[in-house]
Amino acid sequence: MAQSPGISNVLFFIPDIGGFTRFVTETEISHSQHIISELLELLVDSNEIGLEVSEFEGDAVLFFCTAPHTLQELLAQAKRMYLNFHMHLREREKGRVCQCGACTRMHQLTLKFIAHSGPASTMDVKGHSKFIGRSVIVAHRLLKNSVSVPEYLLVTQEALDQLGGKLPTPVTFESGSNRYDDLGEVAYRHHSMTSYLDELTAP
């Protein structure tokens, strides 16, 4: 096991599929696994700004990037993934012939995004590299937060600073924060993604 020198600033970006646990535990496992696998692959294929995949985490993808980006670029990336995600679910629903629980409930899946940045190191174990440090812990802890809507982009103040510090107009970002054990108060801005569904054509 080896630990690499720290990277001064890493942007972590996590698209997370909501409803995953109930979906895979209460429906036919073979079909639910196939659907989730398709969706995770779709998220990776929708990457247009050079994000790198660190690892797959069951219902999420941990992307990272050290190159500079703007919040406008990150929002556009989240929007592209979000629309592709829901278009795929709609197309699958339109062509559905299977009546199993997984196939009839896949339209209930949701998608949210977490963005946080900060210093991090990598740990290599048997040829597999994994990020360690406070920043990646914060990014994962933020998957549980007090945002009231199910589908959103959440950007911490640290990520906002790295992304240029300017909120894109006329997009609305609400302020929020949560306190976590051993991490303290984490401030963030969040933007609801739901209105973008209006841009999808009906299946």
Image: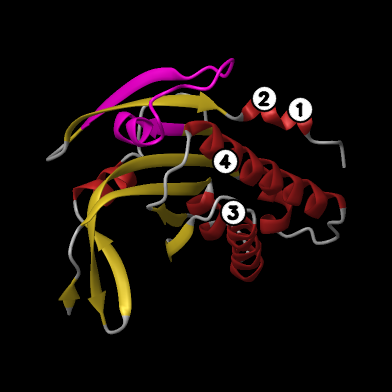
Which region shows up in magenta?
154-179
Q: Which residue is mark 4?
A: 78
- State which quarter of the image contains the C terminus: top right
What residue is rendered at 16% in x and 38% in y? 183
- Indicate whether 201 appears above or below 102: above
Q: CA distance from mark 4 to mark 1?
A: 16 Å
Which of the numbered marks, if any, corresponds to residue 153?
none
Q: Which residue is mark 3?
A: 47
Q: In terms of secondary structure, where does tag 4 sit? A: helix
Indicate which label's residue lies in the foreground, 4 or 1.
4
Expressed as whole percent of the image width and height from the top left, the position of residue 137 reads 25, 49
Q: Which residue is mark 2?
A: 195
Q: CA distance from mark 1 to mark 3?
A: 22 Å
Amino acid at dot 1: Asp
Indicate which label's residue lies in the foreground, 2 or 4.
4
- Residue 71 seen anywhere in this rendered image of the structure: yes
Query: Would residue 178 be counted in the magenta stretch?
Result: yes
Q: Earlier in the sequence, mark 3 or mark 4?
A: 3
Q: Which residue is mark 1?
A: 198
- Residue 143 seen anywhere in this rendered image of the structure: no
- Indicate whether 93 appears above or below 181: below
Disc 1 vs disc 2: Cβ atoms closer than 8 Å? Answer: yes
Q: CA distance from mark 1 to mark 2?
A: 6 Å
Q: Residues within 10 Å of mark 2 (few under 14, many from 20)?
A: few
Indicate which label's residue lies in the foreground, 1 or 3.
3
What residue is rendered at 35% in x and 38% in y? 144
Expressed as whole percent of the image width and height from the top left, the position of residue 65 reads 41, 53
